[in-house]
């Protein structure tokens, strides 16, 4: 059975092949929808290739310069990939509206044949990546690229059939606009999530509940100075200060252990709890 990395390489080769076929087919047939699908496929190929490279980089071990490791490489790739897609969509929208005011002749038979090849190839690629889509934001971004292109390819096929049957060439521009708007919507979701991670926005955890649970531990006076952030999609860091009553260090260690269990329950993977005792502080 192919692992994720081999599936991604196969997907890249397949998408670059589709891109070439659709560019040539779109240029000859005069279909902007086919060219838009080719551009989308090209972005798919580069997105998956970038995701593959990011996964390889992310496996590198921590060092003195990158003490958190290289896990944010995947987030950076997903961010750039989504941003690029939005730029492509803007171009397609502009070209589509231009064509609506001046429709061109389209060779629907060639458009249909190439669109069908693109559709089945994209469905196959989506199947390759589906089982790994939930593993990381980076792979999910690549999967969404392919999935949205499967939808757009289906739209191009339908458009080619309509043009062939009724010779209404403006439908080519209409389909392109729909595809571009759909891709933009999906890209914005990923872009927002990537931006939150890169800006170290606090993840979706309940600070009030964590504070309540920590302060319910016997011997704890107060919990404060909360900070939480994500290095990667699944690496959640948390730090706080906890003021305790007069007690020996051994008892404070027991409190720290209880706090660690509370934080793990809330999905936190890395934590730093600083115990405050009188005027002294020590980290746990």
Image (cartoon, rainbow, N blue to C red):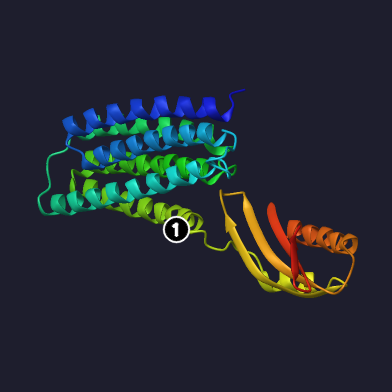
Is 1 located above or below residue 138 in the figure?
above
Q: Position of residue 172 (x, y in %)?
A: 23, 46
Mark 1 is surrounded, within 10 Å at the Cα level, by few (under 14), some (14 to 19) or many (20 or more) other residues, namely: few
Q: Which residue is nearer to you in this view: 137 or 268?
A: 268
Residue located farthest toward the front when viewing the structure as drawn: 279
Q: Residue at x 17, y 38 (%)?
A: 106
Q: Is residue 79 visible?
A: yes
- Seen in the picture, residue 274 relative to 191 is either above or below; the reply is below
The residue that disc 1 covers is 192
In the image: residue 251, left or right of residue 119: right
The quarter of the image holding the C terminus is bottom right
Q: Secondary structure at mark 1?
A: helix
Furthest residue in direction left, as rendered: 102
Q: Nearer the viewer, residue 255 or 95?
A: 255
Residue 171 horizontal/vertical position (percent): 23, 49
Residue located 20% across and 50% down the image: 96
Looking at the image, can residue 268 be seen? no
What residue is at 34 percent from the left and 44 percent from the top? 155
Residue 3 is situated, as x and y percent measured from the top left of the image, at: 59, 27
């Amino acid at each position: 059975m192919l692992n994720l990395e081999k599936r991604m390489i196969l997907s890249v080769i397949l998408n670059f092949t589709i891109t070439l076929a659709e560019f040539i087919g779109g240029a000859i047939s005069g279909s902007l929808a086919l060219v838009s699908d080719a551009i989308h496929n090209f972005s798919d190929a580069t997105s998956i290739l970038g995701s593959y490279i990011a996964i390889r980089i992310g496996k590198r071990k921590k060092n003195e310069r990158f003490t958190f490791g290289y896990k944010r490489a995947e987030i950076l790739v997903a961010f750039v990939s989504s941003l690029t897609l939005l730029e492509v969509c803007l171009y397609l929208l502009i070209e589509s509206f231009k064509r609506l005011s001046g429709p061109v002749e389209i060779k629907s038979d060639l458009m249909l044949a190439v669109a069908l090849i693109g559709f089945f190839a994209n469905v196959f690629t989506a199947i390759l990546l589906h089982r790994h889509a939930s593993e990381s934001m980076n792979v999910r971004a690549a999967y969404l690229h392919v999935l949205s292109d499967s939808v757009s390819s289906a739209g191009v096929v339908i458009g080619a059939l309509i043009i062939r049957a009724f010779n209404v060439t403006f439908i080519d521009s209409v389909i392109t606009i729909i595809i571009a708007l759909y891709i933009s919507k999906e890209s914005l979701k990923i872009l927002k999530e990537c931006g939150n991670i890169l800006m170290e926005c606090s993840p979706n955890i309940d600070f009030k509940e964590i504070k309540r649970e920590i302060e319910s531990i016997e011997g704890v006076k107060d919990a404060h100075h909360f900070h939480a952030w994500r290095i990667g999609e699944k690496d959640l860091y948390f730090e706080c200060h906890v003021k305790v009553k007069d007690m020996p260090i051994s008892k404070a260690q027991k409190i720290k252990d209880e706090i660690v269990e509370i934080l793990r329950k809330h999905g936190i993977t890395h934590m730093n709890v600083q115990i405050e005792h009188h005027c002294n502080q020590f980290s746990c």
